[in-house]
Image (cartoon, rainbow, N blue to C red):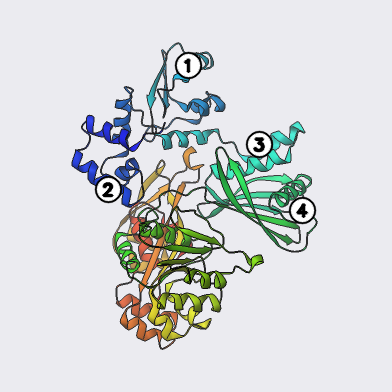
Amino acid sequence: MVFSQENIKKILLENGYLEKSDIESAEIKAKESKKNLGSFLIESNIISKDLFGQAIAESLNVAYLDLNSNPSSREMVLQIPENIARKYRVVIFKKLSDKTILASDNPDNKEFFKKGIPELKKILRSKKIEIGFSLPEDIENVFLHYRHSLDTRFSEMFKSGNVIISELLGGIINDAIAFRSSDIHFEPQKDEAVVRFRIDGVLHKAGSLPRSYYENVLNRIKVLSNMRIDEHFNPQDGAIRFELGDEFVDLRVSVVPTIEGEKVAIRILSVYVRNFSLSEIGMSSENKKIFEESSKKPFGMILVVGPTGSGKSTTLYSLLKELNSGKVNITTIEDPVEYKISGINQIQVNERANLTFANGLRSIIRQDPDIILVGEIRDRETAEIAVNSALTGHLLLTTFHANDSATALPRLLDIGIEPFLLASTLEIIVSQRLVRKICEKCRYSKDYSVAQLNKAYPSAKSFFKKKETLYLGKGCPFCNNTGFYGSTAVFEIIRVTSKMKELIMKNPTSNEVWKLAYSQGSRPMFEDGLEKVRSGIITMEELLRVTKPLDL
């Protein structure tokens, strides 16, 4: 069920959940941040998620059923066939001796009352069915119980002997999207091909294919990606537009030859796009303030660094959404265009047409831009044009591969950027890593003494001066028994102050850069992550997986 902004306002006002002045103020801010009113109210803690659900339920004259606090078990969910559950958007909330209570995000569906309830009375052997309201995202989370392991699906298909390659590949891609994967890997081995999904930055085995079937799957991928199926010894790149219900998901495909056969990696693009904000991606209020202040300057360069898959693009897009006011000309050049944003001119790199980062950037400068995003600085030519663009009245956002913020400066100087140009244009350097968040459904706390902390985490001894309460995830059906659900980022930011500019002119080492930055208040990534550990957002083990304390 879709509630319009006017409906939400009416519901909250008429039932006395918020004052008119609060709603009007929130409506203006929601519009500025390009979010719907309901999402903004919840994210800004103006109204709790449960209170918002309660308000909608009251407007529908049904009970509010909180699936977030009282999740349905897998056994209970599977009592309703998946096709019926998805068609009518219903799940079992509670089953009593005399009735069954169903939760739905569309409880006034007339077709459900006419056809669905009689059908479910027979299936559930229940004389009475009651229905209440649950929020759409909670219904979707419960639907995850319908996902089976890929190995089970594969084996069932292989046993039947009725293997349709297009359905097999479609099932793999659908499952990857359902599990919020960013990448799918097909890894050929002697007798099989292993299928793995990257979820929240970590690879998980999803299943395997016999080699005889894998060859057909590989050819199907090549055909859909417009690759040569008779080429087996050279790397190939392509793209697929995959149909997912009423929407399309863009897939970037890479095929490379290995000693066991051709390996495929598929990057899933544009499927998880929502109204990201800097707070939602894990940026602290202190770092957010620095980041936003730099973006308000009329020209200069904002540089985000980190390895592939560390969330650099998401960070820059979160900033672009705040800057996209309609009063400025924003143009990007990317490879690939991962997130499509209305009101922004986005250019896709095309090597075959000689539309490289460098050539595209030259053309963009002639398009009267205010803000330019360059997807990545890959070479000296692109770096020089980017620096000159920032020097001539443009705000330039870009990414660069470097281990941390301090390392980025020596690396840019090494590829040939003149120190005085870099010192004149660079505003801030942001470094980041993605980390898995503890599953909120199964999170629990554990108290540690100083001795236990020092023994468990010897590299972080200097940070533990008293006993601490840390958090872990037990593992539950909601998080696929991993203990983790979703991801966030840990950051470090170095500001290019007047003293830092003087240091850049001397071709400094990364250690020299950090010593100055630290003396001026910059916090290393480990310290930013440690706050998230103590807040119960991530585990200490997860933080140490991506970074370590800085040795200055």
Q: Please name the residue that numbered disc 3 is placed on.
A: 153
Separation of marks 4 and 2 at Cα, in angstroms: 60 Å
Quarter of the image holding residue 8? top left
Which amino acid, mark 2?
Ile
Position of 135 with respect to 229 (left or right) is left
Which amino acid, mark 3?
Arg
Earlier in the chain: of badge 1 and badge 3, it is: 1
Q: Please name the residue that numbered disc 4 is placed on.
A: 190
Mark 1 vs mark 3: give the one in front: 1
Which amino acid, mark 4?
Lys
Mark 4 vs mark 3: give the one in front: 3
Separation of marks 1 and 3 at Cα, in angstroms: 30 Å
Earlier in the chain: of badge 4 and badge 1, it is: 1
Q: Position of residue 161 (x, y in %)?
A: 77, 33
Quadrant including the C terminus: bottom left
* Helix, strand or loop under label 3: helix
Separation of marks 4 and 3 at Cα, in angstroms: 22 Å
Quarter of the image holding residue 66? top left
Q: Position of residue 67 (x, y in %)?
A: 39, 32
* Helix, strand or loop under label 2: helix
Q: Residues within 10 Å of mark 4 (few under 14, many from 20)?
A: few
Residue found farthest to the bottom = 506
Residue found farthest to the right = 230
Separation of marks 4 and 1 at Cα, in angstroms: 52 Å
| Residue 117 numbered mark, or none | 1
Which amino acid, mark 1?
Ile
Residue depicted at x 53% and y 75%: 382
Q: Position of residue 537 (x, y in %)?
A: 38, 52
- Contact (Cβ within 8 Å) of mark 4 with mark 1: no
